[in-house]
Image (tube, rainbow, N blue to C red):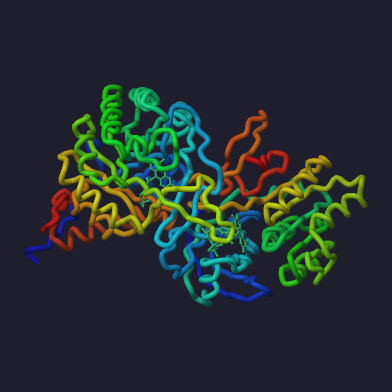
Amino acid sequence: MADTVETAPDMRTEIAGIRMKNPVMVASGTFGYGPEYADLVDLNRLGAIVVKGICAEPWGGNDVPRMVEVRGGLLNAIGLQGPGVDGFVKTYMPFLRQFDTPVLVNIWGRDEAEYEEVAARFDDVPGIAGLELNISCPNIKEGGIAFGTDLTMASDLIRRVRKRTRLPLIPKLAPNVPHVGRFAKAAQEAGADAISLINTLPAMVIDIETRRPVLANKVGGLSGPAVHPVAVKQVWEAAQAVSIPIIGMGGIETAEDALEFVIAGATAVAVGTANFTDPTTVTRVIDGMVTYLKRHGLSSITELVGSIRD
Amino acid sequence: MQIEQAKVKSHTLVGGDYRELVLSAPHTAGAARPGQFVHLRVPRLDGSVLRRPFSIYRARDGQLSILYKTVGRGTEAMEAMAVGDRVDLIGPLGNGFPVEAAGNSPLLVAGGYGVAPLSFLAEELAPTRGTVFIGGGAARDILCVGDFESMGWEVRITTEDGSLGEQGLVTAAVDGWLAAHPDATPVLYACGPEGLLRAVGERGVAASHTAWLSLDKHMGCGIGACLACVQKIRGEDGSVAWKRVCCDGPVFEAAEVEWDG
Ligand SMILES: Cc1cc2nc3c(=O)[nH]c(=O)nc-3n(C[C@H](O)[C@H](O)[C@H](O)COP(=O)(O)OP(=O)(O)OC[C@H]3O[C@@H](n4cnc5c(N)ncnc54)[C@H](O)[C@@H]3O)c2cc1C
Ligand SMILES: Cc1cc2nc3c(=O)[nH]c(=O)nc-3n(C[C@H](O)[C@H](O)[C@H](O)COP(=O)(O)O)c2cc1C
Ligand code: FES
């Protein structure tokens, strides 16, 4: 008895000054802009909401098919369709401000100047807790992953955007680099307040009857349980390279999946693809993490962060 | 829209590769309108992250049914579902067919499993009746004929191999009907493969008849969040934009659908 904690463990956490009631967020692009899932999920229970990627003006994205299921996951090539800064703020911010849940906006640009512009335009929008800087989308030629896989480009971009915003800045790193720790460290040195990883892994599916790629964009990004061990390894490596907090994501379906990220060094986690499979995933993960903390006699989730043993 | 833990009440082979799955799902069944669909999590489908969308075929007394064709891994796994099994579904989803604007003699055009939501529509349209064109590859693809006959509809069957009804494409039969009724101004409703929808849509637009088409697109979330299921749609101001088939559709008016690009 002495070793078990009777009171509910403390799930509160903080990323770059953003206070969250628990460490479980939803991943960009898998939860729309908020209202879409509101009938099915209590948005007040989420640690934070990260909305779909936004660039300066409305953007059409790729042709269809944009998604295909594979064993253990899916490929998407949405191509960052979105309403642009003004469209997003006007249509969705009044809705999002009603909830007691921090809102992070995922931003991207076709070149450095657009990234800077988007960051600057969000700077004085009320109700936005932070910016997740997408430098790792595999689905657009302009920008995206080109920045995320080149150390110099990544760090220049982060430095430039840093100067244009007072909001917490959270670069989202690409998983497909040989030394993610170097990127994490470069991001920290360029002024990042936290790091998100992983984005999807570049991937491809071919229809052997037609001999054509299944996705209109030919290639897409792999997400879901298949990427989970890859993501855990990248988070673990990044955590050793930096002192800023890490948001871990990739293939979380259960509390156990999320806890691996926390033990590897993530301060918070995000659920992506699993929202499609089961919209109750986030709440199940939160509840399961609480159960785990109780079972291990831990009074706070923060005690578990980076607690990996040799 | 809600998540419901439905229970399998019956599961029967209705011919060919088609099965009817009857589920006890009071919330979804109570709210369902023709043309809406459910997003099913297929039980025991290892390594699957996506649900599968199916049109609602019937909805009454707390039960709903779907009529599905086995075409791949998910539908194959569905064949093993047994009475009493639990099925996680989200529904009812989508906008559905507008029933108010059907006029007094609607034409329904169905291809394959596309007949399922149109049978539900005919039920809702009663006492209004009209003509239904049911097309398929062969006799085994022709379903629900009895549903329409019992409601007093004129049923026109076409098969590509001629094994039932007239031989040829269902759209040829529609052309025949339109030519024989030059003064008619029917409202058309169609559900089936994209080729059929385009052909029906073109005829509707050419003859200035309203044609409601239920589109079929690969889906992720099914509720509007992922932007996987989009179709180019022309707005009232003439501008073309992607709309989400899962929640802005699946039913669109033919004149607003931009097929190419
Ligand atoms: C609004 C809507 C209503 C539908 N209603 C019916 C119905 O009443 N009866 C019926 O038999 N089928 C219906 N379908 C098609 C049905 O969803 C697919 O046949 C089914 O998803 C195939 O799954 P699978 O795993 O067996 O096939 P696979 O080909 O192995 O599936 C692989 C992936 O592609 C998707 N997919 C494959 N074919 C289709 C398709 N034609 N449309 C959408 N996604 C597809 C699957 O969902 C899955 O994600 C409907 C589709 C939509 C969009
Ligand atoms: C359909 C879809 C759309 C996505 N859109 C974005 C996006 O706009 N911006 C971004 O940074 N990441 C995007 N992602 C990546 C996810 O946020 C997440 O990093 C990735 O999917 C791994 O997590 P998961 O395996 O839990 O899905 C998208 C993922 C999916 C599946
Ligand atoms: S399926 Fe996700 S938006 Fe339509």
Q: Nearer the viewer, residue A187 or B111?
A: A187
Residue A182: image location, x then y, percent: 21, 40
**Looking at the image, is B123 positioned above or below residue B237?**
below
**Looking at the image, is B120 positioned above or below residue B205?**
below
* On-image quarter of the C terminus of chain A: bottom left
**Going by the picture, which residue comes out furthest to the front?**
A211
Q: Nearer the viewer, residue A293 or A203?
A: A203
Q: Is residue A10 visible?
A: no
**Looking at the image, is B18 positioned above or below residue A265?**
below
Is A236 left or right of B251, judged from the image as shown? Answer: left
Is A128 left or right of B70, judged from the image as shown? Answer: left
Residue at 33% from the left image edge and 24% from the top image edge? A123
Q: Nearer the viewer, residue B155 or B135?
A: B135
Is B118 left or right of A163, judged from the image as shown? Answer: right
Residue A285: image location, x then y, percent: 30, 56
Residue at 49% from the left image edge and 51% from the top image edge? A67
**Looking at the image, is B74 positioned above or below residue A42?**
below
Residue B47: image location, x then y, percent: 41, 64
Residue at 43% from the left image edge and 39% from the top image edge? A33
Is B38 left or right of B187, judged from the image as shown? Answer: left
Q: Nearer the viewer, residue B71 or A260?
A: B71
Residue at 21% from the left image edge and 35% from the top image edge? A186
